[in-house]
Image (cartoon, coloured by chain):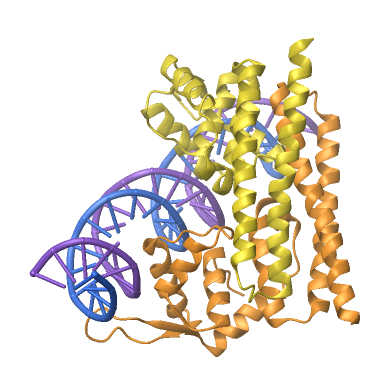
Chain colours: A orange, B yellow, C purple, D blue
Amino acid sequence: MPRHSALEYALLGLLQQEPRSGYDLRRIFSATPFAHFSDSPGAIYPALRRLAARGLIAGGVASGGRRRRTFRPTTAGGRAWLAWLQLPPTRAEVVWEPDSLMLRFAFMGDALPASAAVRFLAVYQKETEAHVAALRRFQRDTQANVSRTGRLAFQAGVAMFLTRIAWARRARKALARKGEA
Amino acid sequence: MPRHSALEYALLGLLQQEPRSGYDLRRIFSATPFAHFSDSPGAIYPALRRLAARGLIAGGVASGGRRRRTFRPTTAGGRAWLAWLQLPPTRAEVVWEPDSLMLRFAFMGDALPASAAVRFLAVYQKETEAHVAALRRFQRDTQANVSRTGRLAFQAGVAMFLTRIAWARRARKALARKGEA
DNA sequence: GGATACATGTAAGATGTTACATGATTGT
DNA sequence: ACAATCATGTAACATCTTACATGTATCC
C-alpha cells in the first residue's frame, strides 16, 4: 500500500467532496484558518500532478490558453482514500503527526459511519494515554538538569496530550448519542 | 538577520549547554520523547555542517579514522542564539509553528532572566487569544457544510489553543512566584 | 485601456527521509 | 575472533518555499 503525503491526502479528500481546480484548493487553504497546508502554487500544482501520475485523480487538459482545470478522483483514487480513512491511529502518528490524524478524522464523516469514527477515537485515546504514561515515566527517571522554562515547556507538551484525551472522550460520547437517535 | 531552521536552533541551543558530538545530539533526539526532531544522520550532520559554514559553531577535525568530533558554539553563534531567544512570539508562529515557539521558550531559561520569559508568555497568550477569536469568527460565519467529524476536529483544534492559553497563564504565575522569592 | 483578480505553471534552492557505506571501539 | 555498538558520513529521492513567468477575464 503506497503512502502519500498529508497534503496529497488533503487534496484527495477535498476532491472527494466535489471536483475542484488547483486554484479552488489553494483558496481553501488560504481562507481556512486551520488545517495548515500551504496555499503556494509551488506545492499544490506539483502535488496534483503527482496524484494524477499515480492515477488517483483525473483532470481536464488545459487546452489553448491557461484555463480552469477541474480535477476529480478516479475509482482507484476513491479506493485509496477509503483505505487511508480506515487505517487505525498508530503511536507514531499520535506522537509525531497529530495533525495528519486530525485530518483523517475530519474527513472520516464524509464516507464512513459513526461507528468507524468511534472505533478510531477509542484507539486514538488508548495510544495517547500510553504516550502520556511514557512522558511521565521519562520525567520521573530524568535527573531534570533542565531549566525552569524547560520544565514548563515539558508540562505544556503533556497538557496538549491530556487535552486530546479529554477531547476524544467527549467526541466519542457525542457520536454515540447521535448514533442512538 | 538570517533565519535558521528549527533543527538548527535546537542544535545550537544544545551545544550552548555543553559541547557535544553529532552522535550525542542524535541520541538526545532519539532518547527524548518530546521535541520531535529526527535523529537521522542525514539530517543532523548536514545541519552541523551548515552551522559551521555560517560560523555559528566550530568543531574539531576528524583527523585520521572516523573519530568523535565535538562541536561548540562560537561567539557569533552565542550572539545569534541570544538574538533568537529574544524574539517575541508572532501570530504566524502561534498558528503555524507552535513547536518552534516551545523550543525557544524551553531554552530561554538557560540564558535569560525569568522576566524575559514572563514577557514572552504575555505576548504568546495575547496572540493565541486573538487566534482563538479568529477561529470562533470563522466558525460562526461558515455555513458549516461540514461533516460531524469535521466539526469535532475543528473543536479539537480550538481546544489545543485554549489549553495553551491556560498553560501560559499558569506558567506566568509560576515564574512570577519564583521571581519574588 | 488599465488595473485587478483569476488561474496555472516553472525554476532554484533548502531541508529532510531512507538507505547505504565505512571504520573504530568494546565486550565476550 | 566476532558481534554489537559507537560514530561519521554520503547519495538518491521527495517535498516544500520563494520568487518569478505567463496569460485570461472582468470591472471601471
Q: Inspect this view and state whether residue A4 appears.
A: yes
Residue nearest the observer in this picture, B109 or D23: D23
Q: On the rendered structure, is A35 left or right of A67?
A: right
Q: Quadrant of residue A87?
A: bottom right
Q: Quadrant of residue A114?
A: bottom right
Residue most extreme to the top = B181
Q: Residue at x 57, y 64 (%)?
A: A6
Q: Residue at x 72, y 46 (%)?
A: B162
Q: On the rendered structure, is B90 left or right of A52?
A: right
Q: Vertical placement of A104 versus B167: above or below?
A: below
Percent from the top left, x then y, of residue A21?
Answer: 42, 78
Percent from the top left, x then y, of residue B176?
Answer: 74, 19
Q: Inspect this view and state whether residue B59 appears.
A: no
Residue nearest the observer in this picture, A153 or B72: A153
Residue most extreme to the bottom = A75
Q: On the rendered structure, is C14 left or right of A54?
A: left
